[in-house]
Image: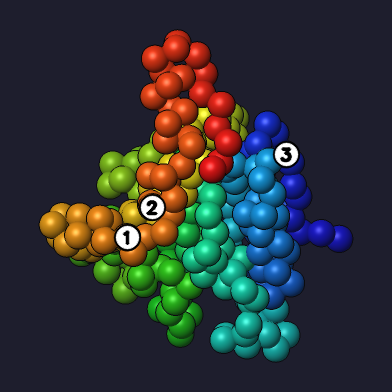
Amino acid sequence: MTAVKLDRRDGILIITLDRPKANAIDVATSLELYAAFKALNDDPGLRVGIVTGTGRFFSAGWDLGAANDGEAVDADHGPGGFAGLTEYFSLTKPVIAAVNGLAVGGGFELALAADLIVASETAKFWLPEAQLGMLPDSGGLLRLPKTIPERIAREMILTGRRMDADEAAALGLASRVVPGDALIEAALELATIIARSAPLAITAARDVLRDTAGMEVEAGYKLMRSGAIPSYQAMLQSDDALEGPRAFAEGRAPEWKGR
């Protein structure tokens, strides 16, 4: 039985992890998730992805039952890395993590790999790996200190302490906190706004943000203007870059061509 359910809505792909009881992720589930994210990437009719879970858990992370049955700590989880997204660096479309509950270990790392996090009021985030003799090396070590203050990230990594939804919002980890029954609608609202934007502009924005992360502003400008970010150059030279101002001047919605 599939652990990943797909729901397509007006250019938005909702990817739901449904693997009771805790939406834990083994190699087979990682490969299913990667197939879903690749479908998002490859389908020109899809603009934004939403990944969420069922029940109390967004995801409990690595399936320790599979580990007990012999799945190695360093098992190959496929081209997208653990959970199909954590190392999918060539993905050109944004993903929103709609965190419905507990995001633990690799489940937290899956959420961190998304562009935005919308959290339910019951969401909690933590990285228990060090207490289990491992490390959160599917993005927790690398992404969390870039997302929240480094000292708090270090505390979470070293102690396994839990962060609730309100603290996640206060620190900028989650962009919105909503009641559980409003979670998917809140994520869809954000996704719909993103989907109205020019696709080349969204891709270029993501690439510039990624490639200039950690740079001083002047160095970031130099890289952006150097021609070394192909998607930025493609956006500047696109028909869509002319269509946007034209549509604004004519008082109509733009008709994006993606070229």
Cα separation between marks 2 and 1: 6 Å
Distance between the alpha carbons at the discs numbered 2 and 3: 31 Å
Q: Residues within 10 Å of mark 2 (few under 14, many from 20)?
A: some
Upstream in the sequence, badge 1 or badge 3?
A: 3
- Tell me residue 122's x, y (percent): 49, 42
Disc 2: which residue: 233
Q: Residue at x 66, y 59 (%)?
A: 38
The residue identified by callout 3 is 8
Left or right, 145 with reference to 188:
left
Residue 218 falls left or right of residue 149? left
The quarter in which the C terminus is drawn is top right
Q: Residue at x 74, y 41 (%)?
A: 7
Which mark identifies residue 227?
1
Looking at the image, the residue that sits furthest to the top is 251
Looking at this view, is 96 or 25 the one in front? 96
Residue 15, how many percent across, how many down? Answer: 67, 49
Amino acid at the residue labelled 3: Arg
